[in-house]
Amino acid sequence: MENMNGAGPYGDSGSTSVSKMVQKLSQRYRYFLDKTTPHTTGRWLALLALLVIYGVRVYLLKGFYIVTYALGIFNLNLLLGFLTPQVDPELEGPTLPSRKEDEFRPFVRRLPEFKFWYSSFKAQLLGFVVTFFPVFDVPVFWPILLMYWLVLFFVTMKRQIKHMIKYRYIPFSLGKKSYSKGGGKAGKSDK
């Protein structure tokens, strides 16, 4: 028999305790993510370790090539988002400086580094878990998948590099001048 407020015969305490537990787990998860945000090198090394573990597992099982191909396509898509500016100059006009007298505007990625890492890490974990279920081990001739992925990678990167050259942007900050808040250069001093 239901109460007037629509709760079941046992009241609402079961669903509130579950929601409190889910909220607490969510807060701990968010806390963990916030703690890992500044540790860029450690995060990427963890992803690399997960990729190696996944690769060894697929090699030993001699299967799950479709899953690996899907992970490769997904990570290629993430890489493109990471290398592409947030505002595409082809669609909305050149917002990046194309001449020396143009105003400097920093490169803003369509996909920030943390979201790139986070999405890739989640995908790798999902791919690793999927390898425990034989239903996802579809028999395919893997050299064709590898060849198709390599062609797709090279064509996509060629197009992306042409786009970077045409609109004169570099999506990496390696070798670029950086300035501190005080107005002076940060990093190496010119002695």
Image: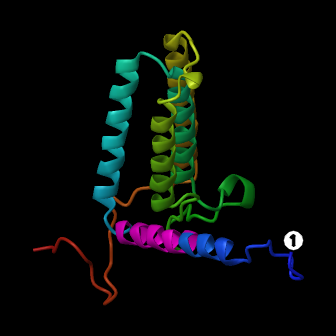
Q: Nearer the viewer, residue 93 or 99?
A: 93
Residue 76 in view, yes or no = yes
> Within the image, what quadrant is residue 17 found in?
bottom right
What is the x, y in percent for residue 138? Answer: 58, 17
Position above or below: 165 against 25: above
Q: Can you name the residue that lies furthest to the right here? A: 4
Q: Residue at label 1?
A: 1
The stretch in magenta equals 22-36
Q: Is residue 164 magenta?
A: no
Q: How many marks?
A: 1
Judged left or right of residue 149, residue 58 is left
Q: Nearer the viewer, residue 129 or 9?
A: 9
What is the x, y in percent for residue 169? Answer: 50, 56
Rendered residue at 72%/77% (across/down): 12
What is the x, y in percent for residue 13? Answer: 66, 77
- Element at label 1: loop
Rendered residue at 55%/65% (across/down): 97
The amino acid sitting under disc 1 is: Met
Judged left or right of residue 191, residue 58 is right
